[in-house]
Amino acid sequence: MTPRRALLWGAGALLCGLFLALGVWQVQRLAWKNDLVARVAARAHADPVAAPAPDQWPALQADPSAHEYRRVQLTGGFLHESEQLVQAVTDQGAGFWVMAPLRAAADHVVWVNRGFVPSASRWQTTREAARCGGPVTVTGLLRRSEPGGGFLRRNDPAAGRWFSRDVPALAAAAGLPPAAVAPYFVDAGADTPCATPQGPVGGLTVLRFANNHLVYALTWFALAAMTVAATVFAARDGARRRLPGQSGASS
């Protein structure tokens, strides 16, 4: 085998192996995504359980994915004076998530995403009826904190501009002691307490996950097959081109 032919087969084998590895990886990602979707659906539609108490927070922080989207329930009073608005785009348009800390009976605090309000209802004075005056029970989905901010936009607590639901930052801006604040927040369901026509509108948690891994896997496997075909064709074509010269030399 000539060096050129060896290089051709080596390059073909390398590319084919790379494409096959990427295809297998996408198959593994497909299995992971399908499992995630199934787990989230089961949690989101299960009967609610009590929201994790302080003694459960360390385990939750160690493995947030084991609890995320779990349907939980908690009772307490909203600290309306510490409410924060986080910019949001939903099926109902652009506006804000109403993030309000809820002080539970055990005196710890859980941030609750009470739901969506349009820009016209961002001020509490436009939705006075939404200020729950006493203890309320909230049922919703447990969500992990969203640190930092949104895409290319950092949270600016000093200016009151929030692009993600960053629980520690929200707690710091509200002057709440970190040790007393849960490391998660709760997306209130459609029955969010004290909702008004102006909002907040609960139950808008997006439970759809992009799942294109099968398409990606088939693409990589197709590229692997095309690489094999192209390598074989190039090798045979090269061999055919050398035949007349080899015959002439032997005569």
Image (cartoon, grey):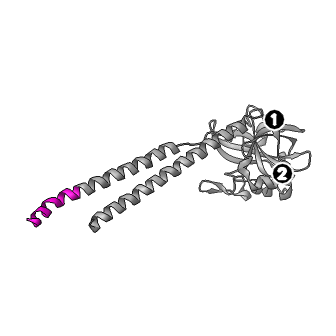
Look at 72% across and 46% down and name the residue there. Answer: 68
The correct choice, above or below, for 60 with respect to 119 in the image is below
Look at 76% across and 55% down and name the residue there. Answer: 61
The correct choice, above or below, for 230 with respect to 71 in the image is below
Look at 31% across and 61% down and name the residue there. Answer: 8
In-front residue for pair 198/3: 3
Look at 48% across and 50% down and name the residue there. Answer: 23
Residue under pointer 2: 56
Question: Where residue 96 appears, x then y in whole percent?
Answer: 69, 44
Residue under pointer 1: 193
The magenta stretch is 237-251
Mark 1 residue type? Pro
In-front residue for pair 244/12: 244
Mark 2 residue type? Gln
What is the quadrant of the C terminus in the image?
A: bottom left
Farthest left residue in view: 251
